[in-house]
Image (tube, rainbow, N blue to C red):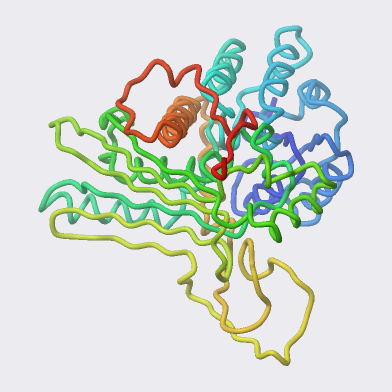
Amino acid sequence: MNNQRIGIGFIGGGFITRFHIESLISVRNCDVMGVMSRTKSSAEESALLAKSIGVGHNAKAYDSITEMIADPAINALWVCSPNFARIETFEEIANAINTGKGELIGIACEKPLGRNYEEAKRVKELTQSVGLLDGYLENQVFSPSITRGKEIIWSRGAATTGRPYLARAAEEHSGPHMPWFWEGSLQGGGVLNDMMCHSVEEARFMLTEPGKPRDSIKAVSISAHTDCLKWQRPEYSKILSDNSGGETDYSKRPSEDFARSLVEYLDEDNNKLIVETTTSWCFVGEGLRLSMELFGPEYSMFVNTLDPDLKVFFSRKVTGTEGEDLVEKQNAESGGMPVVSNEAEVYGYTAENRHMVESFLAGKRPEENFDDGLEVTYLLMAAYMSAEQGKTIKLPNKEIETFIPAVARGEWNPKG
């Protein structure tokens, strides 16, 4: 192989894959060589996108994961396929390498690593069993506002007055794009599993001293609450049913559209640290809102992606088709609206993929890896356990390792 460049194969050809491909415009030493998807047309569309923006002149659609691994031009895989396909995906990767079908340097996997702890652990084991480097694609810890904010807070505020002790993170929008995301059994849960994975990891990252490992702060308890505030209402559950051809029934099998958690940590000196997270699929505003707040003895930090450096206004006389050209999960086409000018950059995809490519080329394990993905899954399962039992869960707790949330079993209904 040419060890100066990485040939990337994408597994999954949908929304998140297109985000990654667009981010690669600003990443050196890599080429999109292939896309494989359960739907061949989506693989072809994503491959065409890579060609059209100049990040994959030879990109093409493949029929299987094994076929991509067998292509010597592909050195690493980005796993962006649906949650319910995680285990079969990694089993096929491991089998292809074990049977000599081809070679890889590493795998980068989108969140969550698995729908529960056992799945996430299996993903990590399968990857390491064939000697591959592993990168966990948690874009928000690579967001420029987060990384620069952390650098400033720790070098100025924490250095003079003491470490930060409270982080608040939120991710909110009006609901996922694809019908399978709404199904607890397929996705692994609702908004908690889908979006709190970002919030707990981003907040943990902010509270961790630069240069220290993630276990330099230890989670000691978690309390959480889940609910279905909007999408179980008859007029909205009908929308989900219609969009899924009658498959999704939120009147009987809802997933949570609101979740909050409070995680307590202890640092190396046994000082208490707090992480508060809020996530929802029932936020109706301009579009996707990501927010982060960090507090210490004499300082604070605030990030809100709906407070960008560009805003536009359209009167009711301006009409057009619905879209997401201004901000992800855009909810309107008129009025005063923020514009996220480069979502791939602002949300962290560019820096994330630059780090993965550079790490794989150097033969080093990425700093954000499957250990992080496994720990995030552990915290999410603890949050579900807390919400179901209505009490604070002390950590560590062995029961979390085999826990499957009621919503993932299709047995959760806040209306009884």
In this rendering, would 385 be left or right of 154? right
Left or right of 247 in this view: 80: left
Q: Residue at x 60, y 53 (%)?
A: 26
Q: How many marks?
A: 0
Residue placed most toward the observer, 416 or 218: 416
Percent coordinates x, y for residue 307 in the rendering: 45, 71
In the shown orientation, is residue 224 left or right of residue 366? left
> Measured from the top left, where is residue 345 in percent x and y?
54, 57
Identify whether 207 is placed above or below 155: above
Q: Nearer the viewer, residue 374 or 142?
A: 374
Residue at the top extreme of this rendering: 99
Up-down: is 373 above or below 139? Answer: above
Q: Residue at x 60, y 86 (%)?
A: 313
Farthest-out residue, front? 416
Percent from the top left, x then y, of residue 48? 84, 50
Residue 389 or residue 102, whichever sits in front: 389
Where residue 398 sits: x, y (%)?
Answer: 39, 15
Q: Residue at x 73, y 44 (%)?
A: 249
Quadrant that contains the C terminus: top right
Dividing the picture into quadrants, the one containing residue 1 is top right
171 in relation to 1, above or below? below
Q: Is 220 situated above or below 326?
A: above
In the picture, measured across the screen, residue 86 lies left or right of residue 389, that is: right
Residue at coordinates 74% horizontally, 52% vertically from top-left?
Answer: 240
